Amino acid sequence: MARSFVEITDLTADEIWEVFDLCKKMKSGEIAPKPFDGKTVGCIFHKASLRTRISFETGIYQLGGQSLYITEKEIELGKRESIHDAAKVLSRYLSTIMIRTFDHQDVLDLAKYADVPIVNGLTDLTHPCQIMGDYFTLLENKEKRDDFKIAYVGDGNNITNSWLNLASRIPMKFYIGTAAETGPDKAILKKAQDAGISEIKLTTDPDEAVADADVIYTDVWASMGQKNQADEKARILKAYQINSEMLKKAKSDCLVMHCLPAERGKEITDEVMDGPHSVVFDEAENRLHIQKALMLHCMGG
Ligand code: CP
Ligand code: NVA
């Protein structure tokens, strides 16, 4: 089995720091490796994307390769033929495969059967590239410490789950402020708590979540594939909006993060998103750099 990146927990803590280091060197231009010279990387998309698609395609080009945009329409993954057979065939053409899809199990199966690295570009369960890039953004903005308080407020979703996975490798205080019915994945939460690396708290009180936080993070209240629940979630999660009042409860130099796309006026106000604490566009930029580092890591560094 090739070295894939399906979960942040596929990496040890040391490997996570190695990836951040690689990322820093590539972003600064200190190194500019071309491991994909003459090679093709497949990018499978079963959901919409701006950042992931464009940053992967640009990053693959910068690493010397060509990218191939593949949608459900072409390959009908798991329908026209089994994931096993598709994985075996794709591995004969491609150097690495990035996939964004619904069912997390499909990505695990692809990684199991492929002979080349598989990179998770978001599933219903996790979004690991995003959170690696976000932590890198945090490190760019603050002195390295192992006790940042990260407050995630809003829907407990794939972003929350990936933060939990990072918290099971790197020490932090990770507080989730969400309603009783919108919590994160229970198994991932338990695993992160059992790892004993970080202080992890789930609360329905947004004030408790953001008190003295170094970072306040949010995401859309209804993720892709759940847009039919948007009104219901907006009703349940109203109290978790990041606005100026909420910001006053965090540290005075706290960062505001959002993976984007945002639904301005719902989970975050314009004032905060465009305000001095916001690093949302740095996060978007860092997707490019972190994914290059992650692909390089999968290929052996
Ligand atoms: N943050 C993120 O993954 O954005 P896209 O859905 O536009 O790729
Ligand atoms: N939770 C969001 C993240 C988008 C990058 C979604 O899955 O739609």
Image (cartoon, rainbow, N blue to C red):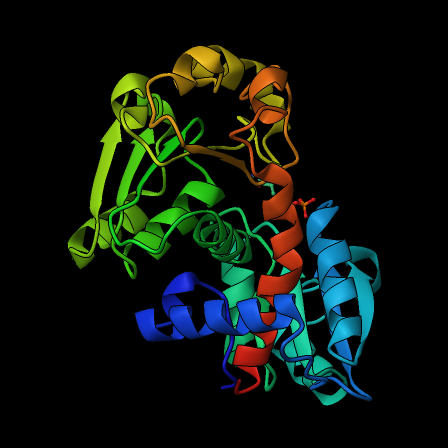
* Residue 285 in the image, given as x and y percentages of width and height: 66, 51
Please tell me which residue lies in front, 132 or 108: 132
* Residue 245 in the image, given as x and y percentages of width and height: 42, 11
Please tell me which residue lies in front, 101 or 248: 248
Q: Which residue is rendered at x = 72% and y = 80% of the image? A: 90
Q: Which residue is rendered at x = 53% and y = 21% of the image? A: 267
- The reply to whether residue 145 is visible in this rendering is yes
* Residue 196 in the image, given as x and y percentages of width and height: 15, 55
Please tell me which residue lies in front, 230 or 221: 221
Q: Is residue 48 above or below residue 264?
A: below
Residue 171, quarter of the rendered image = bottom left
Q: Which residue is rendered at x = 69% and y = 86% of the image? A: 35
Q: Which residue is rendered at x = 59% and y = 87% of the image? A: 115
Q: Quadrant of ligand 1?
A: top right
Residue 9, quarter of the rendered image = bottom left
- The reply to whether residue 80 is visible in this rendering is no
| Left or right for 109, reference 225 | left
